[in-house]
């Protein structure tokens, strides 16, 4: 039994160090103009996410409808939780509720972002209906909504995501994507 545990520990250590070193050297492409990019102005404008009015969150608070929750004791920070390409549904809603509860208990304001909320469709597979830049703009829209909560330090807003949500979070810090998302915002304001 001890040999099995040691072998498993060594295997896990190997996988962890391999994945860590791989992540450091991996080059993620900047999608910028890739996919449908910002060419779907009208279609994607109607797909902007609406965020609910902030309310006090609980351990079993809903994770649907793009809610913003307030903790019982605010620490001045916020976490935006981004869903995978398939969105939040009956198979994974419990997981999103648990992540939401974990951050609420630590004093974070939370925003659970369902990137596939109606009228949007799942954004999985080769022929994604939404551009990578649309996902980046979702991060900025969520950040803007959370930053309006009283008591939040705008420099302490964090993002976690799952699968495509994690990719969108990472892509949101690249300067080309920032510029594209801001350009898209100006287009929306002109219409």
Image (tube, rainbow, N blue to C red):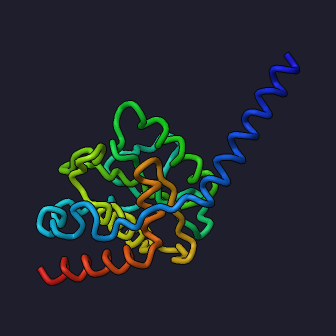
In this view of the protein, can residue 142 be seen by the observer? no
Residue 35 location, x and y as percent? 25, 60
Residue placed furthest toward the top: 1
In this view of the protein, can residue 119 be seen by the observer? yes
Residue at point 76%, 28% (across, down): 8
Q: Quadrant of residue 136?
A: bottom left
Q: Is residue 163 left or right of residue 71?
A: left
Residue at point 27%, 46% (across, down): 126
User: Which quadrant is home to the N terminus?
Assistant: top right
- Depicted 60 relative to depicted 155: above or below: above
Say which of 15 and 133 sits in front.
Answer: 15
Residue 149 location, x and y as percent? 45, 71
User: Which quadrant is home to the C terminus?
Assistant: bottom left
Residue 160 location, x and y as percent? 51, 56
- Depicted 86 relative to depicted 72: above or below: above
- Depicted 109 relative to depicted 11: above or below: below
Residue at point 32%, 61% (across, down): 132
Residue at point 62%, 53% (across, down): 22
Say which of 74 and 41 sits in front.
Answer: 41
How many labels sit on residues? 0
Say which of 117 and 183 sits in front.
Answer: 183
Residue placed furthest toward the right: 2
- Depicted 173 relative to depicted 11: above or below: below
Q: Is residue 137 left or right of residue 94?
A: left
């Amino acid at each position: 039994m001890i040999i099995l545990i040691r072998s498993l520990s060594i295997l896990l250590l190997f996988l962890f160090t391999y994945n860590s070193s791989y992540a450091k050297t991996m080059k993620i492409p900047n999608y910028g103009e890739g996919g449908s990019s910002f060419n779907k102005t009208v279609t994607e404008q109607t797909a902007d996410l609406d965020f609910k009015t902030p309310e006090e969150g609980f351990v079993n608070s809903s994770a649907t409808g793009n809610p913003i929750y307030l903790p019982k004791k605010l620490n001045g920070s916020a976490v935006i939780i981004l869903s995978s390409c398939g969105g939040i549904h009956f198979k994974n809603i419990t997981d999103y509720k648990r992540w939401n509860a974990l951050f609420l208990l630590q004093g974070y304001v939370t925003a659970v972002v369902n990137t596939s909320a109606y009228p949007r469709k799942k954004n999985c597979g080769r022929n994604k209906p939404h551009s990578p830049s649309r996902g980046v703009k979702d991060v900025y829209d969520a950040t803007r909504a959370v930053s309006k909560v009283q008591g939040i330090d705008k420099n302490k807003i964090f993002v976690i995501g799952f699968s495509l949500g994690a990719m969108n979070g990472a892509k949101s810090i690249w300067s080309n994507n920032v510029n594209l998302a801001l350009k898209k915002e100006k287009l929306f304001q002109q219409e």
